[in-house]
Image (cartoon, rainbow, N blue to C red):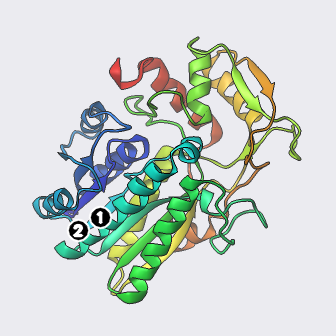
Amino acid sequence: MDESILITGGAGYIGSHTCVELLNAGFSVTVFDNYCNSKPEALNRVESITGKSLTRVQGDVRDRVALEAALRSSGASAVIHFAGLKAVGESGEQPLRYYDNNVVGTLRLLEAMQTCGVKTLVFSSSATVYGAPQFLPYSEDHPFAPTNPYGRTKLMVEDILRDAFASDDSWRFSILRYFNPVGAHASGLIGEDPQGVPNNLMPLWLQVAVGRRECLNVFGDDYDTPDGTGVRDYIHVTDLAEGHVRALQWMAQSDGGLCRAFNLGAGVGYSVLEMVRAFEAASGKPIPYRIQPRRAGDLAGFHANADSARSVLGWQVTRDLQTMCADTWRWQSNNPSGYVG
């Protein structure tokens, strides 16, 4: 396959793993990234893993002129849009920054795509668009009720895509709603390398395991779950990356326009303490933890109904909890200071 793809935010955690899967599937890849929450070294590692080269363009997703130039120079026929701020807590503290980057940035991207005649987009959305569960597992027709600015930016972009498609049905949109990505590439060369204080559980466990943090704070042990701690649907980042390739392939087979959302999750939930025990087994390291009060806005638990992705895209998870933890530990062991080291 000799199709060119532009990936915004392609040097990030999910973006870099998706670059690997795209290159291995025969796509040509151009990464457009400002490296505000990623490092160029990740792309060097992608090239090492695949033995293939990719093109890099440094730029901000809010810069329409730069986006148009990248689309034209790459000859891209489709875009995968990862470039977005993603910390739920930070979004409450800096909502205007999140709306500017996530919503305005997507508008600039869509305008550039329209100008350049590129009408195919895979959008990186989130299960946060659903909010508190009215029923479980979440299916794509669950009502929307995001509880934080981050989730609201994702829903706003989804609405923009649906409105664009309603006005011009030559667009092809795949909206992928992620659950909880964890893990790292099996090579141990690329993985999650958060800037500052991590927002996700797995990087926090890693910091405890290597002695950079005294213990893990577990927020709440009195939820209505098997052990009282929060339950989440964790998905290996490589499984998630493969979902993007399947979405592109599905859209390429269509004779007309498309606009459809898909849940990408494992369909099963694990509690915080289950994850701690699994990671202790994978790493051989104890993970001391301390129970803290619940955090405002946290949900007891949720998991995905991913039947649509399975039946339409032909996608499903193939990596289990033990693999997620083992791959994460391999990445951390090989890169104790992340890409800087």
* Quadrant, the N terminus: bottom left
Q: 180 or 148, which lies in front?
A: 148
Q: Do residues under tags 1 and 2 come within 8 Å of each other at their CB atoms?
A: yes
Q: Nearest the camera: 13 or 143?
A: 143
Please report the residue visible at 17 percent of the width from the left and 56 percent of the height from the top: 66
Type of amino acid under label 2:
Ala
Q: Residue at x 64, y 61 (%)?
A: 146
Is residue 75 at all visible to an observer of this figure?
Answer: yes
Tag on residue 109? 1
Assign a secondary structure to mark 1: helix
- The relative height of residue 190 versus residue 284 in the rendered view (above or below) is below
Label disc, if present, on residue 112 of the rendered structure = 2
Q: Position of residue 206 (x, y in %)?
A: 57, 23
Query: Left of 263 or right of it: where is 294?
Result: right
What's under tag 1, amino acid-wise? Answer: Leu
Query: In terms of image quadrants, where is residue 126?
Result: bottom right
